[in-house]
């Protein structure tokens, strides 16, 4: 079972974990007050009369802790880091939380608390979060959190569900089996076929099915409207295949995509309010990054000059395809040798020999992307969106990958959903995978989804995911 939060479908277990840890953080602040001032729960009213309402402080502290953990990938169900990685992320998240809490309490006087209370609250939050994580690791994979799914279809479309192999894609459901529609070619294994005998609703009742996924190859032949209607009226959710795969995998599957689903389905917002919120976020984020990252940008410029000579360019511009297929020049710090493309455009490879020593560092830390904030301020790019590709590659990919040009219906971005969910792409196969995530973002884009992506990008930068 998945819950939609900020444009993403999170497993119910992860959403429950975030809620529990938010409550624990809220309670940690109250417990810190009781310990610091040596009062019981009944004495909190006296503290409220002396310091003002306490609940806004608790809410602010809770939001900071949960947001920090989100930024460090601690609610990312698409990865299962080792214990050491989880502890490292948790430590960094809580250190950032402590700094953010201290800054907030001093910037907003009405939320001020003693430093000892804030420090004690962080310590108690650590204890609460560690405890919740231990419990979560024991119960998160229990079947109680999963939907029991029955697939109506046994052909090529239905096999898309059978081919889901990644545990993260199957985290939210348990696949009970397939019902073979009359006249459809069977592709799924015979041992997975269930017999409904014309009573699909009865079969679902006997097996405890909570969702039926319609995955027929051809709906014009024997579409079971009465049976599906009985299921729907009995409280069983009926879902189309594409919608199911979008929800469970966080991407739009190209292999089963049809234009009518994109035309008549929800999403793909481009109304004036959405365009305004996107532009406002771009400008504010770019100005903030320029202020914070200016020292790193100056150091990078000097380092490139020292390595390659003071006459060598520190920046380079390169033609990329933007909104509506229009070309623009993207700005980046130069991370490769000046003769890197004497033989024409080519994909960047792992351990690419063209990358300089300084380039290897700034690519790992994503510092080479910082000049692109100028592109954002000029309106060529957004902060969040599909990565802009070179026209040479776009021409090749558009011929081989269906719906590839549709990614140009929004501005390209510095970071994006595909960058969070998939490693660096350096082939046509990678481009196909990333396109599926890009289409998911384009369909579900919103201000809150953009903010969630920006927060989670901190993990990519700090832990070097996907850099090449």
Image: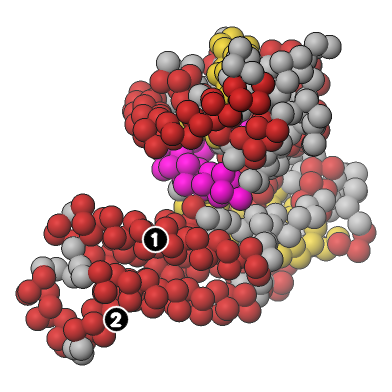
Q: Is residue 359 above or below residue 230?
A: above
The C terminus lies in which quarter of the figure? top right
Element type at mark 2? helix
Q: In the visual, does 66 lie left or right of 85? A: left
Q: Position of residue 232 (x, y in %)?
A: 57, 57
> Majority secondary structure of the magenta segment?
helix
The image quadrant of residue 286 is top left
Q: Is residue 373 above or below residue 327?
A: below
Element type at mark 1? helix
Residue sitting nearer the eye, 460 or 44: 460
Residue 31, which numbered label? 2
**Farthest right residue?**
190
Circle 2 Cα neighbour tier, 10 Å, few/some/many (<14 / 14–19 / ≥20): many
Q: In the visual, does 326 lie left or right of 288? A: right
Q: CA distance from mark 1 to mark 2?
A: 17 Å
Q: In the visual, does 70 lie left or right of 436? A: left
Q: Is residue 403 above or below residue 422?
A: above
In percent of the image, x 63 and y 79: which residue is there?
138
According to the image, label 1 marks what residue? 97
In percent of the image, x 51 and y 76: which residue is there?
130
Residue extent of the magenta highlight? 436-463
**Farthest left residue?**
49
Residue 441, which numbered label? none
Circle 1 Cα neighbour tier, 10 Å, few/some/many (<14 / 14–19 / ≥20): many
């Amino acid at each position: 079972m998945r819950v939609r939060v900020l444009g993403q479908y999170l497993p119910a277990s992860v959403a429950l974990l975030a809620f529990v840890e938010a409550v624990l953080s809220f309670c940690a602040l109250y417990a810190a007050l009781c310990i610091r001032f040596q009062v019981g729960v009944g004495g909190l009213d006296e503290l409220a009369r002396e310091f003002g309402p306490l609940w806004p402080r608790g809410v602010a502290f809770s939001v900071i802790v949960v947001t920090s953990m989100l930024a460090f990938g601690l609610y990312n169900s698409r990865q299962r880091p080792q214990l050491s990685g989880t502890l490292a992320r948790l430590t960094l998240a809580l250190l950032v939380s402590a700094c953010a809490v201290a800054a907030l309490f001093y910037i907003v006087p009405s939320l001020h608390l003693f430093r000892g209370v804030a420090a004690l609250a962080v310590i108690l939050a650590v204890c609460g979060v560690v405890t919740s994580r231990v419990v979560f690791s024991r119960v998160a994979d229990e079947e109680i959190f999963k939907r029991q799914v029955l697939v109506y279809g046994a052909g090529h479309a239905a096999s898309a569900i059978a081919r889901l192999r990644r545990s993260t894609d199957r985290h939210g459901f348990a696949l009970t089996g397939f019902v073979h529609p009359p006249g459809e070619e069977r592709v799924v294994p015979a041992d997975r076929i269930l017999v409904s005998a014309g009573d699909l609703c009865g079969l679902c009742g006997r097996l405890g099915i909570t969702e039926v996924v319609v995955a027929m190859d051809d709906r014009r032949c024997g579409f079971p409207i009465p049976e599906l209607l009985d299921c729907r009226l009995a409280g069983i959710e009926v879902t189309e295949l594409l919608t199911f795969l979008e929800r469970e995998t966080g991407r739009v599957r190209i292999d089963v995509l049809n234009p009518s689903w994109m035309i008549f389905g929800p999403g793909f917002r481009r109304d004036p309010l959405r365009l305004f919120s996107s532009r406002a976020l771009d400008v504010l984020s770019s100005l903030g990054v320029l202020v914070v990252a200016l020292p790193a940008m100056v150091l990078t410029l000097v380092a490139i000059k020292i390595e390659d000579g003071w006459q060598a360019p520190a920046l380079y511009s390169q033609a990329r395809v933007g909104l509506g297929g229009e070309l623009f020049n993207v700005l980046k710090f130069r991370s490769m040798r000046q003769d890197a493309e004497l033989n024409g455009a080519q994909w960047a490879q792992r351990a690419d020999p063209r990358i300089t020593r300084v380039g290897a560092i700034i690519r790992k830390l994503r510092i080479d992307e910082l000049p692109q904030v100028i592109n954002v301020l000029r309106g060529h790019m957004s902060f969040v969106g599909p990565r802009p590709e070179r026209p040479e590659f776009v021409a090749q990919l558009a011929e081989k990958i269906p719906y590839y040009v549709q990614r140009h219906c929004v501005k390209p971005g510095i970071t994006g959903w595909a960058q969070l969910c998939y490693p660096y792409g350096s082939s046509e196969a990678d481009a196909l995978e990333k396109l599926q995530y890009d289409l998911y973002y384009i369909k579900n884009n919103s201000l809150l989804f953009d903010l969630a992506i920006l927060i989670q990008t901190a993990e990519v930068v700090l832990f070097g995911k996907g850099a090449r």
